[in-house]
C-alpha cells in the first residue's frame, strides 16, 4: 500500500532531520559539493565560477553555460552564476540571503540589504578590502573617487576605518522636475523663476487648456503614493529629499533630518495650498506608479518629478498614445524668499558589493579579478549592451538596445552604467545606442540631463549608513512622516499638526538617531 | 410540486439576490480580462474600466508563445494532481483514527494539530529542517510539505465523526477491519468531503510560491505562480538607458492581467466538475439530537 | 492497567498504524521547526546560529509592549479581528443556506462558481482593483455623482478603512467559504426533507430544523479554527489596502512586524510577535473549545 511508502519515506526523513540539524555548525554540507564541482573546472586552468547575488526584478537567471554566462566568461575571465532570487522590494531578497547565510552557503559576491553589511563585517563574514582592492582590483580603486572611499572608511561598522564594501556611485544629479515646455510656449509663458511665477504657470496649466482638447482635464503637477515623487515641490524650500524620503543636510549649522526642519513645515504648507486650489493632482498621495505615469503619458500633466534620464520612455509613450511629441524642459528650482532651493543629489547611493570572506583563495582571487574587470572602463559599454540578440541588436552598424523582455533576457547583474555612472558615460551610452526613431526623445533627455546639473546639490547626509537607524525601523521607514505629510497635504490635518509630528518623531527615537547621525558626520568631516 | 406562492416569492428573492451578488463577484474579473485584451496605449492612459479598449490579442500572443510558461504550467498541473491525491490519502488515514473515540491518543493529537495550525514556525528553522531532509533544490518540495494540512485534517475528522454509526457497526459484525472499513465503506461514501478537500489542497498546490522561492534554485522546476510574480511584483528598480518600447502593443499591465487569467482559469474550471460529488455523495449522515 | 492498554492495542492497532504517517509529518514539518521559535527569547544572529545566539529573556516581548504605538496597533488588530469573526464569518453560512434553496442545478452551479472566483485573485490584484474603484474616475465616485454628491477619495479616509476591509474580505472569500458548507449540506439525507414536506413544513422551517442543525457542527469547528487565528488577519490583505493616511486605523500587528521585523531581517523580534499572536489565539481556542464541549459534543478535543 502506498501509504506505507510514504510512511517509510517520512520516517527516513525524520532521521535525516535529526542528523543534519544536529550538526548545524558544521560548514560545507552541500556547499562542499558545489565547491568540488567548481574546483574540477578550475583544475584544468579553466575559469572559476563564482556565485553572485544582486537585484533581479524578474529577468532570467545566469546559469552555467548560458549566453550571458559565456559572455561574462569571455569578457571578464570569470564564470558568473546569478541564480534567480526574487527581489520584491528587497524584502524577499534579504530573507533569502539570510537563509543562505544560516545554511553556511553565502554567495561569493553580493549586494547587502538594509544595512546587512554591518553584521556581516562584525562577524568576519565579508572580507576586508582595504589592502586587497589596490593590489588585486586597481580598476575599482581608481574608478571610485577618493572622497567616497573616505566615507566608506568612516562607515566601517568595526570602527577601524577599514573598507568592507564597494559603493554605488553616481557622479551627477539624476533628478529634476520636468515641465512641459511646449505648453509654456503655447500659452505664451516664460519659464518660471520664482515661486509666484511657478504658481501662475500651474494656474495657467489648470485653466487655459494647454493640451487643447477643450476639456479641463489638465493636472498641473502632482506625485505618487506614499508622498513620493513630488520632490520638486519640496526642493524650493531647500528640503533634502531622495525620491520622497526626507534626508539629512545641514540646517541651522547642524546635520538634521529634513523632515523636522522649518523648511519642511513651509514646504508642506505650500503644497497643502496647491492641493486645495487644485494645482496638484487630487490623487497625488494615492497614485500608483502605473496611474501617475498613465496621467503623464496621456498628455494631461504639466510638470512631474523623476529621473531625467528615464524621460525618453515617457515621451515615447506619450507620443504613441496621443500623437503629441511633447517637449519637456528641466524646471529650474523656483526661488522662494528666505530659502535656498536645490534638487537633492547623492553621489553615494548605497553599498553595492561585498565579498565573502572566502577560505578558498582561488575563489577570492577570482572574485577580485571579476570586480577589477567589471570596473575596467573599456568593458563598460559591452557590459551595458549585454548579449547580442538578447539584450541588443545591430542595426545600420549600430548597437541598439532591445526592449525589456523578462522571458528571454538574462539578468545583467554586472552593469557599471548603473553602479558607477558619470554624466558623460551615460550620455555617451545613450547617443551611441539610440535608434533613428527614438532620437528626438533621447536628444531631449540628454539636453535635460546636462541642464539638471545646474540645480543639483550633494547633501551633507550623503553616504550615511543605515546603521544609524538600528532599533528604530519606523524612523528609517519614515512611517510617521508619511502619515503626517500626507494628511497635511490633503488637508485632513492643519499645518499646526506639524509641530506635534516633530515632537513625536523626536520621542520615538528621532533624538537618538539624530545623535548617531551627527556622530557619523563628525567622523566623515575629519 | 406543491409550492405555495409565498415560497415561490421566497425562492425568487433569494435567486435574484444571489445573481446580483454573482455579478458583483465577477465584475473585477471582467475588468482584468478586459485589461489583458486592450492595447498598451489604452491601458497606459487608464482608459480601461470594464470593457476592452482598442481590442488586441497581443498580450495573449506573448503569453501563449512563451515556452517557459507552458512548461511551468504543466509542471504545476502535475504537482497539483499528484500532491492532491497524496494529500487526500494522508489526511484520510490520519483523520479516521482521530474521529474514533476508541483511539486513545485522539485528544492529545488533536491538541497538537491545533497547535500546529495556530503556531507558525519561524522561517529559518523551517528552512533548515526542510533542507535537512533533502528537499533543497529537489522538486519533491513542490509536493511533500503540502500533503497534510491541520485545518483540512480537522474538517475531514468533523465529517467522519458525523458518519453513520449503524453502518459501521454492521460492517464490523461482518468482520471488517479498520483498514477495509476506511477504504471500502467510509471513503466511498465521503465523496463530498473528499471533493472539498481536493479543492482545498489543489488550490494551495496550484497557487504555491513560497516553497519554490525558498527551496528551488533550478528555474526548470519553477511553478507557474513564480513566473507570474515576475509580472505582478511592481518593483520600481529603475534601469538606466532603458530602451524603446514604442513598437510593442503590450506593457507590464496588460501582461500582468493576461498571466493572472492564464493562471486562474484551470483551477476555476475544476470546481464545477467537483460539484457533482456534492450532490451524489448525499447518502451518509444521521441527524443527531 | 497494563493489560487494558495492551488489550486496547490488540484490538485497535490499525488505528495507531494509520496515524503514524501523519504524526511523523507533523513532527518533521511542524514541531521540529517550531522548536526554533526559541529565538524569540534570544538575539538570534544568522552567524551564530540557534545554539550560540545569546539568551535575552523577554526582551523582544517588552520591546513590543513598550512601543509607543503598541496600544493603537493592538486595538486595530483586535477590532478588525472582531469584525472578521462577527460580520465576515457568518456570511458563508448564510450564502450556503441561500444557494441550497435554488433547485435548478445549472443555475446553482453557476452562482457557486461565480461567487468563489474572487478567491483566486491575489490581494495585490484586488488591492489594485479597489484603488481603481474608489479613484476619482472610479465606479464609486460615478455612483456618488448620480446622487449629486461630492466625490470622496475613500482610500485616503480613515473612516472608510474598516468598512472597506470588511467588505473586501466578504467579497473575496465568502463564496470560497461556502464550499465546506455546501459539502456538509449535500450529506443530508433527502428523505428528511421529503418527510418534512409531507408534514407540511415550510422552506424556512426546513432550514431551521433540518439544514441548519446538520450544518452546526461544521460551523462550530470552523468557528473554533477561526478564533485560533484571531489576531492573524493576513498581512497581504491589510498591506494592500493601507495608505499612510489610514495608518491610524489600519496598522495591525502583521503590518507592524513586517516593517520592523521582517523587512529588517530581525528574526527574533518577528518570532516574538508571532508567538504573542499564537499564544493568544491558542488560549482563545482552548477556552471556546471547553465551552463548546459543555454545550455540545462538537469540540475539537
Image: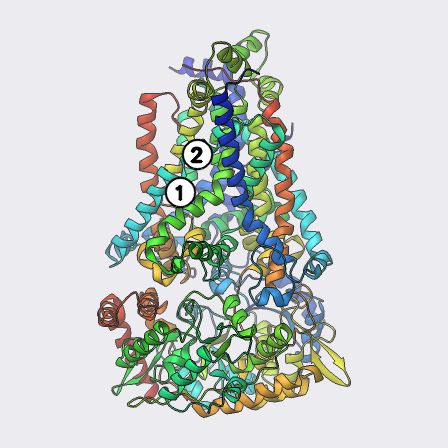
Q: Give the camera-side residue of A524 and C95.
A: C95
Query: At 55% from the left edge and 36% from the top edge, which residue is drawn?
Result: A11
**Residue B223 appearing in the image:** no
Q: Disc 1 marks which residue?
A: B119
Q: Quadrant of the N terminus of chain C?
A: top left
Q: Specify the farthest residue to the right.
A: A396
Query: At 68% from the left edge and 71% from the top edge, which residue is drawn?
Result: A68
> What crowding class fits label 1: few (fewer than 14 Cα within 10 Å), some (14-19), or many (20 or more)?
many
Q: Find residue C190 and report its horizontal and vertical position in percent.
A: 55, 16
State the CA–CA distance, disc 1 to disc 2: 10 Å
Disc 1 is placed on an element classified as loop
Disc 2 is placed on an element classified as helix
Query: At 57% from the left edge and 23% from the top edge, which residue is drawn?
Result: B190
Task: Name the subunit of mark 2.
Answer: B
Q: Disc 2 marks which residue?
A: B113
Query: From the viewer's perspective, is residue A513 above or below residue B87?
Result: below
Q: Find residue B229 and report its horizontal and vertical position in percent.
A: 57, 57
Amino acid at each position: 500500500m502506498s501509504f506505507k511508502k510514504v510512511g517509510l519515506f517520512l520516517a527516513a526523513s525524520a532521521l535525516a532531520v535529526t542528523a543534519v540539524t544536529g550538526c548545524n555548525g558544521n560548514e560545507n554540507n552541500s556547499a562542499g559539493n558545489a565547491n568540488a564541482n567548481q574546483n574540477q573546472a578550475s583544475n584544468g586552468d579553466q575559469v572559476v565560477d563564482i556565485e553572485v547575488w544582486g537585484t533581479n526584478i524578474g529577468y532570467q537567471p545566469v546559469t552555467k553555460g548560458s549566453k550571458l554566462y559565456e559572455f561574462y566568461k569571455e569578457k571578464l575571465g570569470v564564470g558568473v552564476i546569478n541564480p534567480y532570487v526574487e527581489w520584491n522590494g528587497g524584502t524577499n531578497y534579504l530573507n533569502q540571503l539570510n537563509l543562505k547565510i544560516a545554511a553556511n552557503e553565502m554567495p561569493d559576491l553580493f549586494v547587502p540589504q538594509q544595512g546587512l553589511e554591518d553584521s556581516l563585517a562584525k562577524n568576519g563574514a565579508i572580507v576586508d578590502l582595504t589592502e586587497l582592492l589596490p593590489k588585486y582590483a586597481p580598476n575599482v580603486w581608481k574608478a571610485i573617487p577618493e572622497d567616497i572611499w573616505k566615507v566608506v572608511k568612516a562607515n566601517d561598522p568595526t570602527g577601524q576605518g577599514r573598507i568592507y564594501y564597494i559603493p554605488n556611485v553616481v557622479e551627477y544629479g539624476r533628478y529634476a522636475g520636468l515641465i512641459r515646455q511646449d505648453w509654456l510656449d503655447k500659452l505664451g509663458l516664460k519659464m518660471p523663476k520664482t515661486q509666484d511665477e511657478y504658481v501662475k504657470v500651474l494656474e495657467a496649466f489648470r485653466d487655459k487648456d494647454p493640451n487643447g482638447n477643450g476639456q479641463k482635464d489638465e493636472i498641473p503637477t502632482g506625485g505618487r503614493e506614499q508622498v513620493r515623487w513630488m520632490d520638486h515641490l519640496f526642493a524650493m524650500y531647500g528640503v533634502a529629499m531622495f525620491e520622497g524620503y526626507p534626508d539629512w543636510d545641514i540646517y541651522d549649522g547642524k546635520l538634521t533630518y529634513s523632515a523636522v526642519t522649518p523648511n519642511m513645515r513651509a514646504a508642506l504648507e505650500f503644497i497643502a495650498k496647491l492641493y486645495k486650489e487644485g494645482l496638484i493632482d487630487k490623487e497625488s498621495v494615492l497614485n500608483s506608479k502605473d496611474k501617475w505615469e498613465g496621467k503623464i503619458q496621456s498628455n494631461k500633466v504639466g510638470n512631474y518629478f523623476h529621473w531625467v534620464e528615464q524621460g525618453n520612455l515617457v515621451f515615447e509613450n506619450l507620443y504613441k498614445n496621443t500623437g503629441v511629441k511633447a517637449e519637456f524642459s528641466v524646471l529650474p528650482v523656483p526661488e522662494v524668499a528666505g530659502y535656498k532651493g536645490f534638487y537633492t543629489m547623492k553621489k553615494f547611493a548605497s553599498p553595492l558589493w561585498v565579498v565573502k570572506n572566502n577560505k578558498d583563495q582561488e575563489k577570492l582571487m577570482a572574485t577580485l579579478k571579476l570586480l577589477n574587470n567589471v570596473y575596467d572602463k573599456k568593458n563598460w559599454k559591452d557590459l551595458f549592451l549585454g548579449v547580442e540578440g538578447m539584450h541588443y541588436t545591430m542595426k545600420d552598424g549600430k548597437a541598439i538596445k532591445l526592449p525589456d523582455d523578462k522571458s528571454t533576457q538574462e539578468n545583467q547583474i554586472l552593469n557599471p552604467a548603473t553602479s558607477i555612472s558619470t554624466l558623460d558615460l551615460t550620455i555617451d551610452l545613450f547617443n551611441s545606442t539610440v535608434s533613428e526613431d527614438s532620437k528626438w526623445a533621447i536628444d531631449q533627455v540628454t539636453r535635460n540631463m546636462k541642464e539638471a546639473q545646474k540645480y543639483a546639490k550633494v547633501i551633507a547626509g550623503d553616504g550615511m549608513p543605515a546603521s544609524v537607524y538600528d532599533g528604530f525601523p519606523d524612523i528609517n521607514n519614515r512611517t510617521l512622516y508619511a502619515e503626517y505629510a500626507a494628511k497635511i497635504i490633503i488637508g485632513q490635518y492643519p499645518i499646526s499638526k506639524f509641530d506635534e509630528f516633530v515632537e513625536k518623531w523626536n520621542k520615538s527615537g528621532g533624538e537618538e538617531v539624530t545623535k548617531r547621525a551627527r556622530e557619523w558626520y563628525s567622523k566623515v568631516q575629519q | 410540486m406543491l409550492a405555495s406562492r409565498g415560497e415561490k416569492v421566497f425562492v425568487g428573492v433569494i435567486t435574484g439576490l444571489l445573481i446580483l451578488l454573482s455579478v458583483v463577484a465577477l465584475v473585477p474579473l471582467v475588468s482584468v480580462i478586459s485589461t489583458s485584451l486592450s492595447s498598451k496605449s489604452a491601458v497606459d492612459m487608464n482608459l480601461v474600466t470594464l470593457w476592452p479598449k482598442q481590442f488586441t490579442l497581443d498580450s495573449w500572443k506573448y503569453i501563449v508563445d512563451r515556452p517557459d510558461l507552458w512548461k511551468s504550467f504543466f509542471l504545476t498541473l502535475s504537482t497539483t494532481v499528484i500532491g492532491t491525491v497524496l494529500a487526500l490519502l494522508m489526511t484520510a488515514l490520519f483523520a479516521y483514527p482521530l474521529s474514533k473515540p476508541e483511539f486513545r491518543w485522539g485528544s492529545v493529537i488533536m491538541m497538537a494539530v491545533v497547535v500546529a495550525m495556530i503556531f507558525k514556525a519561524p522561517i529559518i528553522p523551517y528552512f533548515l529542517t526542510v533542507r535537512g531532509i533533502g528537499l533543497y533544490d529537489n522538486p519533491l518540495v513542490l509536493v511533500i510539505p503540502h500533503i497534510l494540512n491541520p485545518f483540512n485534517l480537522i474538517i475531514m475528522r468533523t465529517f467522519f465523526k458525523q458518519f453513520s454509526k449503524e453502518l459501521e457497526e454492521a460492517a464490523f459484525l461482518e468482520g471488517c477491519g479498520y483498514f477495509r472499513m476506511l477504504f471500502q465503506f467510509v471513503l466511498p461514501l465521503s465523496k463530498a468531503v473528499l471533493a472539498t478537500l481536493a479543492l482545498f489542497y489543489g488550490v494551495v498546490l496550484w497557487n504555491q510560491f513560497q516553497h519554490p522561492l525558498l527551496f528551488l534554485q533550478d528555474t526548470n522546476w519553477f511553478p507557474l505562480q513564480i513566473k507570474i510574480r515576475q509580472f505582478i511584483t511592481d518593483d520600481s528598480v529603475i534601469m538606466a538607458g532603458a530602451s524603446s518600447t514604442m513598437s510593442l502593443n503590450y506593457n507590464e499591465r496588460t501582461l500582468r492581467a493576461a498571466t493572472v487569467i492564464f493562471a486562474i482559469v484551470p483551477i476555476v474550471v475544476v470546481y464545477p466538475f467537483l460539484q457533482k460529488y456534492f450532490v451524489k455523495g448525499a447518502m451518509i449522515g444521521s441527524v443527531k439530537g | 492497567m497494563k493489560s487494558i492498554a495492551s488489550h486496547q492495542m490488540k484490538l485497535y492497532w490499525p488505528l495507531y498504524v494509520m496515524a503514524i504517517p501523519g504524526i511523523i509529518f507533523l513532527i518533521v514539518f511542524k514541531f521540529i521547526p517550531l522548536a526554533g521559535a526559541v529565538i524569540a527569547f534570544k538575539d538570534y544572529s544568522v552567524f551564530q546560529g540557534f545554539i550560540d545566539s545569546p539568551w535575552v529573556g523577554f526582551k523582544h516581548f517588552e520591546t513590543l509592549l513598550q512601543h509607543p504605538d503598541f496600544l493603537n496597533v493592538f486595538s486595530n488588530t483586535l477590532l478588525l479581528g472582531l469584525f472578521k469573526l462577527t460580520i465576515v464569518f457568518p456570511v458563508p453560512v448564510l450564502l450556503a443556506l441561500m444557494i441550497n434553496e435554488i433547485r435548478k442545478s445549472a443555475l446553482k452551479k453557476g452562482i457557486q462558481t461565480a461567487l468563489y472566483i474572487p478567491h483566486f485573485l491575489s490581494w495585490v490584484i484586488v488591492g489594485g482593483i479597489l484603488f481603481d474603484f474608489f479613484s476619482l474616475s472610479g465606479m464609486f465616485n460615478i455612483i456618488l455623482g448620480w446622487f449629486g454628491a461630492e466625490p470622496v477619495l475613500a482610500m485616503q479616509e480613515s473612516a472608510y478603512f474598516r468598512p472597506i476591509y470588511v467588505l473586501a474580505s466578504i467579497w473575496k472569500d465568502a463564496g470560497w467559504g461556502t464550499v465546506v458548507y455546501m459539502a456538509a449540506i449535500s450529506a443530508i439525507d433527502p428523505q428528511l426533507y421529503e418527510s418534512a414536506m409531507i408534514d407540511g413544513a415550510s422552506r424556512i422551517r426546513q432550514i431551521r430544523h433540518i439544514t441548519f442543525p446538520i450544518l452546526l457542527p461544521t460551523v462550530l469547528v470552523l468557528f473554533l479554527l477561526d478564533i485560533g487565528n484571531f489576531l492573524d488577519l493576513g498581512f497581504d490583505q491589510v498591506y494592500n489596502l493601507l495608505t499612510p493616511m489610514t495608518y491610524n486605523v489600519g496598522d495591525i500587528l502583521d503590518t507592524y512586524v513586517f516593517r520592523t521585523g521582517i523587512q529588517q531581517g530581525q528574526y527574533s523580534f518577528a518570532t516574538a510577535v508571532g508567538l504573542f499572536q499564537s499564544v493568544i489565539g491558542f488560549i482563545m481556542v482552548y477556552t471556546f473549545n471547553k465551552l463548546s464541549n459543555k454545550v455540545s459534543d462538537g469540540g475539537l478535543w
